[in-house]
Amino acid sequence: MPLSCLAGNLQLKQQLLPRLTGRRLSHAMIVSGPEGSGTHTLAGILARGLVCSGTGAAPCGICADCRKAAAGIHPDIITIRPEADKKAINVDQVRRMRADAHIRPNEAPRKVYILEGADLIQGEGQNAMLKLLEEGPAYAAFILLARNSGALLTTVRSRCDQLRLACDEPSRDEELFQQAGQLADCWLSGDEHALMDLCVQLEKYDRQQVLILLGYLRQTLCERLSGHPDRRTVLRGITLADQLLQAAERNVGTGHLLGWLCAGAKARI
């Protein structure tokens, strides 16, 4: 789960995970929070999710678009920063971005603009940006980074999903992360009985915890993909994790999800 590299913010992760799994990210998002809260980290995850050309949950981490985005060299992820010796992005930069947005993406399905310090943009620039948020091409997406989202015009905020980060929450759930590692071990070994026993133990978790657990499982399998001799088995596991996450979004019960996981392990043997 790409969101695992974002410290804390469990509630926000629970909110975002179904959107990434179902590839339903908004075309305009405000990512706000104090310094050190991970706004740039989250913006990077969202940008990768938007340009991902793979299958299943986004970002898949496998396709060429994801690899380029992770390396910081994707031509369709454009970061707009204040010009030298300026404190904020100015209206001319916003107008140039508006013109550029009407040029189709080079490689990816989407073209993503990350705006640094969007809350510092003056009124004229925000109004120019508003027109782009309202009338921009369908393939263009915008991630507005802000310390104080309240400084953005109400009309701008109303057209964006608002994602607020905090920096005083605990990091990843280590118990769930370890359980996901055990699930991955059982899946890759083909040990159906061990997987069944483990899934019975996991029934103590509620739906939200299982959702996070499945995200961790997907992340663990992705991390093991490059070094595992049987890539096909690992990829089947990633696909199954994607299917389970999508089912969880549709309120499929915890017991059914865990049973589906066991059935998937039996089918691969």
Image (tube, rainbow, N blue to C red):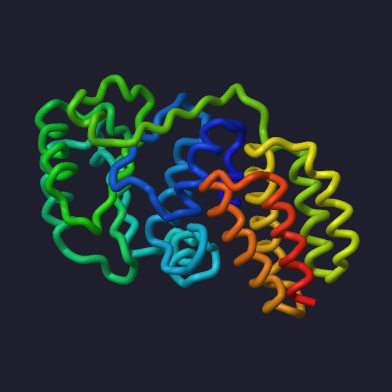
> Residue placed at 34% from the left, 36% from the top?
161
The image quarter in which residue 91 lies: top left
- The answer to whether any part of residue 217 appears in the image is yes
Residue 39 picture location, percent across and down:
46, 36
Given residues 246 and 21, the one toward you in this image is 246
Residue 133 picture location, percent across and down:
19, 42
> Residue placed at 60% from the left, 51% from the top?
1
Given residues 262 and 150, the one toward you in this image is 262
Residue 139 picture location, percent across and down:
25, 59
The image quarter in which residue 241 lies: bottom right
Quarter the C terminus occupies: bottom right
Given residues 105 and 261, the one toward you in this image is 261
Residue 252 picture location, percent across and down:
59, 47
> Residue placed at 14% from the left, 59% from the top?
102
Q: Is residue 263 above or below residue 8?
A: below
Q: Is residue 143 above or below residue 225?
A: above
Given residues 56 and 42, the one toward you in this image is 56
| 150 with respect to 147 (left or right) | left
Q: Is residue 7 above or below residue 169?
A: below
Q: Is residue 190 above or below residue 11?
A: below
> Residue placed at 63% from the left, 50% from the top?
215
| 73 with respect to 225 (left or right) | left
- The answer to whether any part of residue 116 appears in the image is no
